[in-house]
Amino acid sequence: MDKGARPNWDNPMQFVLACVSYAVGLGNVWRFPYLCQLHGGGGFLIPYLIMLFLEGVPLFYLELAIGQKMSLGSIGAWTAISPYLGGVGLASVVTSLYLCLYYNIINAWSFWYLFHSFQSVLPWADCPINSNRTGPIEECERATPTQYFFYRETLDISSSIEVNGGIHTGQALCLVLAWLITYLFIVRGVKSTGKVVYFTATFPYVVLFIYLIRGMTLHGAINGVKYMFTPKMEQLANPTTWINAATQIFFSLGLGFGSLIAFASYNQYNNNFERQAIIVSLINSGTSIFASIVTFAIYGFKATVNYENCLERFVTRLLLLNAFSLAEDSITMDTVFDWIEKLNTTYPQQFAEIADKLENCDLESELDTAVEGTGLAFIVYSEAIMNMPLSQLWSVLYFIMLLLLGMGSMLGNVTAIVTPLRDFKITSRMSNELLNGLVCLFCLLLGLGFTTPSGNYWFTMFNDYGATFSLLFIVLIEVITVSYIYGIKRFEKDIEDMLGHRPNWYWKIMWSVTSPVLLIALFIFYIINYIKGGTPTYQAWNKELRYALGSMLVYVAKTTTF
């Protein structure tokens, strides 16, 4: 390895913003709100915050300390600790490469939606007309316009992973654009990244704040916010709640990819990374909670609209009016349930004859419907946006925010690959522009597979299995290595050399006992779940049959195995 004259961040603020831009990503917007919804609203915050201090902050601190001390990327840093541990760094690079291959396709989808937002009517607001001009396309009528636009217009998805086809030209061009912008962001290494993060780390908060103000003024938004902050304490007795809290902290902070080690390697030797580790970790978790308030306000609006539409549907009113010969204006939206209760009590036999034809309208059920990932980002949000006044404006703002969150994470992902490569003598002679360009081009060419009709199934497989076990194993080896091979005492001296003081008892207990035990427990949990789950399956699009997944309807003909 050849350190040479290593560049540095212009100031500590650039490093903090780079870490924030990397750690605060799409998972804060579409994964954390889902877990809150799944595990009892505000009650989920209790295990989440406990795991933050037992696992998240100590491991974040550890990776920053290693990077700053060694001033090398992940491969060089672990090789410097022990020649036998270079494989840990290599594993981080390979995992980051897996992530880069598919992560930018999300940014490509965001570009696609952004470009389609500049229309007088949002294209996912209504079903397109069929070729005969006689009515809406049948496939769209079976789903909803938002689902049709995502699965058919955006993905042009096939019926299974085995059914393939040519590259989706629009998606391929959007992917090229996403990688071109990623390259421009990192073209000169840390000097370029340090400037870009001022925007990628801060502007999403501006959009989130605007959405918070707009969201809280939407009809029914308060129902969603109340739902979020009403804890279901019985969920604390559920082990899965604690496992998901620990997992969310782990993946949200971006541990194990080598990005934090790479970023910290560009710090001044005496930079106060301890304070920065705490600040970034708290910002990351605070953003998750802040984004959840915005998301639940949107949830509340969408759930209330669906609920009221259910109450106002012609069939329900007509059934009651005709069956009991009531005046046409006697049943309103506010009195539907009162009339149902009254008629059921007064005429039980007659009411029983029509009971199975009445829709079950329940606001709580609407709010209980949990959706995560692309279903939340590109379907649920899109459906809510199209019901807002000035929907084009809100759509543009939303997809710009998604783009910046995604691009900010990509900066860290690519840096985790490039920095270790640059530490080798053979590549250290290459210019930043050439090395970064080759890495981006390589990832782009392999990533084009995700723009084919079966690409979304491959995306799901990479997302679910590409960086789960590997990351847990990498970070477990990291913390055991530092605590028991490199040695806590030696690590303490290194930190004292950089900061002027030794870490206190809290950090030492977390590194040597608590964090390893939690990681081993998570690892065992994932292995057991994987074995119990049997053959991995996925849901495939079939335009003939309808299947409900949360509040996101998709079409499946059968359960298909990978």
Image: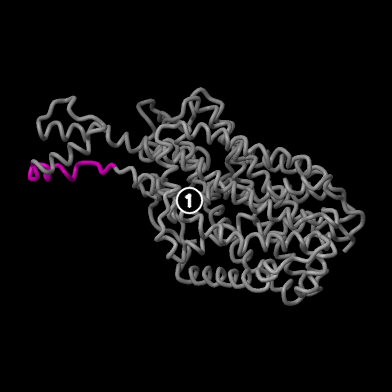
Residue 360, magenta (yes or no): yes
- The reply to whether residue 406 is in sight is yes
- Front-lying residue, 416 or 557: 416
Residue 324 appears at what percent x and percent y?
A: 10, 34
Residue 539, magenta (yes or no): no
Tell me which residue sits at (55%, 44%) in the image.
290
The quarter of the displayed image where residue 468 is located? bottom right
Residue at disc 1, secondary structure: helix
The quarter of the displayed image where residue 312 is located? top left
* Magenta residues, start to end: 347-361
Residue 26 appears at what percent x and percent y?
A: 59, 47
Question: Badge 1 local density, few (<14 within 10 Å), some, or many (20+)?
Answer: many
- Front-lying residue, 131 or 107: 107
Residue, disc 1: 34
Residue 42 appears at what percent x and percent y?
A: 46, 52
- Above or below residue 376? Residue 54 is below
Tell me which residue sits at (56%, 26%) in the image.
118
Amino acid carrying label 1: it is: Tyr
- Above or below residue 464? Residue 299 is above
Q: How many marks?
A: 1
Answer with left or right where residue 478 lies relative to residue 327: right
Residue 209 appears at what percent x and percent y?
A: 58, 36
Colour scheme: one colour
- Above or below residue 219? Residue 380 is below
> What residue occupies the far bottom of the structure in this picture?
484
Tell me which residue sits at (89%, 59%) in the image.
3
- Front-lying residue, 445 or 483: 483
> What residue occupies the far right of the structure in this picture?
4
Answer with left or right where residue 270 lies relative to residue 447: right
- The reply to whether residue 169 is in sight is no
Q: Quadrant of the N terminus?
A: bottom right
